[in-house]
Image (cartoon, coloured by chain):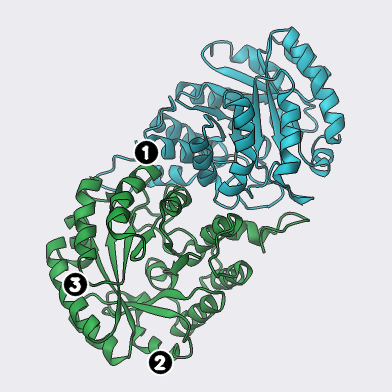
Chain colours: A green, B cyan
Amino acid sequence: MVEIFEVGPRDGLQNEKNVLSLQDRVWLIESLSQAGLHSMEVGSFVRADRVPQMAESDLLPDWLKSLQKTQLFYLVPNLKGLERAITKGVKNIAVFTAVSDSFNKNNIGMSVDESFQVIGDIVTSAKSHGIRVRGYVSTVWGCPFEGRIEATRAIPVLERMLALPIDQLSIGDTIGVAAPVGVREVLFPLLKTHGPSRLAVHFHDTRGTALANALASLELGINAFDASVGGLGGCPFAPGASGNLATEDLIYLFKEMGIETGVNYKMLCETSLELAKKMGGRALPSRALRAYQSNCASNNSWDK
Amino acid sequence: MVEIFEVGPRDGLQNEKNVLSLQDRVWLIESLSQAGLHSMEVGSFVRADRVPQMAESDLLPDWLKSLQKTQLFYLVPNLKGLERAITKGVKNIAVFTAVSDSFNKNNIGMSVDESFQVIGDIVTSAKSHGIRVRGYVSTVWGCPFEGRIEATRAIPVLERMLALPIDQLSIGDTIGVAAPVGVREVLFPLLKTHGPSRLAVHFHDTRGTALANALASLELGINAFDASVGGLGGCPFAPGASGNLATEDLIYLFKEMGIETGVNYKMLCETSLELAKKMGGRALPSRALRAYQSNCASNNSWDK
């Protein structure tokens, strides 16, 4: 059984123009949980004036109290955010950095070195409160400002994150440029040293390669995969282009390979179609979802 | 070096509503050839009243005489079509069947058995004229009418095609349902018996899995891959869904894996963008093409 880490309600929605109401966000999280997605990033303790899509995240822990089976993660950018999370009884947080300074500065206003100081303090404090921590590292294969990132440059940053007492590292192809050879180049040494238990991969489908990269990762021994419902979350650096790997596409691939995910494909797709309505009726980028919706064949045992 | 077999000018265009003029089709074929695509399906000797997109295919061989480096294939449904092809000096033809009777009857009005009688006659006559023959087998992993196709059912049909003196067999996932486990189940025994020299794979991206399937095939030893410029050719059984694997997505994957294709990525993408204009300004489905068009990053060495 592999773990599907659902990032749509935070990473996905944050990169969409539409702002979903708190009520709709709660509906989405509950529906995804019911579909079997039990690891999920749902909110962010950031300033609402900067990220309106994540406003009222403080209210989510109370609204979602009934979801006992699902690990709900909240992005925490600094110690102040962590305090807010602790006050709200949050049990799982995510911290964030990147391989490239210019992306990090553009995204969170800090160099990679500076961000690791902040992250170190957050992780220490979080662990002392019994909080699980997920660490994101972005731009592992490429940066929108600095271009290609070599494995020899990415791996030390990933190792630096793994040296902290985090529970899971999410290895991110932020602009969707990776291909299987480069994926293996990064993952193989990490797997050799650490094994798969703390490693997750986060692929973007900007150039259509996300599932090929997921396959290469799976076959190396990775068993945790980030994905976003419907493919929610475009690429902020490429207007009109796809961003996050769609959860439907990933689940479709795995179910057809006989790989257990615990996710009910039909319930997931029905949630996505309902979500598309709430997002103003736009077609979500997931290809598997469109095939599900077309429900093409008269004898169709796939889209179920 | 792997062979990219471009199917856009025939298979792609035939499944589009827009009908391109003969002049535009000639421009497309010449541009793709200049971009390095030297195996291409360009026309069809069928009745123009049935397939208006392929009208005037008889005129193509004369128009394309200068393309000496490129193998130009024409679909030939029957002996009458072959006669027209021979008259026109055609050097490469394609014949067509499927694993499932109901798809074949719907598509070409014949059962699989009946189609093999016709194909046998075409191949014999074609070879006696020194014409190269490509054999398509569709619905290898699934049929829109009959549902899942097991490998034990598909392989005998593929073997039957390989028993003919054809030069290449194209193994088709017509409705885009295959995943790597099933791909290996079909390809492994064929490769074991025949080696890769006469085998090509034809994947559809209806559920986003085409590149993962291409990767699995490549790593088994397959070195010929069908693809369609821009992802041209939707799925006639799923309105709005994607059909053919986009040539750009496949070339992007391969170039980033260091696999030689002989195709100039930039020239291919520029051709696709020009084609999109000629198709009434619609966005073609290729994800890599959209990323190329967005030309997002300030330091972008990928989309070149």
Name the residue rendered at 39%, 35% in the picture. Answer: B255
Question: Mark 2 highlights which residue?
Answer: A62
Query: SS of the residue at dot 3?
Result: helix
Question: Mark 3 highlights which residue?
Answer: A119
Q: The residue marked by circle 1 belongs to what chain?
A: B
Cα gap from disc 3 to disc 2, whole angstroms: 26 Å
Note whether B152 is above or below A73 in the view shown.
Answer: above
Of residue A12 and residue B192, the one placed in the foreground of this image is B192
Looking at the picture, how far across and down is residue A267, in whole percent? Answer: 61, 72
The quadrant of the rendering that contains the N terminus of chain B is top left
Q: Earlier in the sequence, mark 3 or mark 2?
A: 2
Looking at the picture, how far across and down is residue A186, in whole percent? Answer: 30, 50
Of residue A193 and residue B70, the one placed in the foreground of this image is A193
Of residue A130 and residue B12, the one placed in the foreground of this image is A130
- Label 3 Cα crowd, 10 Å radius (few <14 / some 14-19 / many 20+): many
The quadrant of the rendering that contains the C terminus of chain B is top left
User: What residue type is disc 1 on?
Assistant: Glu
Name the residue rendered at 44%, 84% in the picture. Answer: A22
Looking at the picture, how far across and down is residue A20, in whole percent? Answer: 45, 77
Cα gap from disc 1 to disc 3, whole angstroms: 33 Å
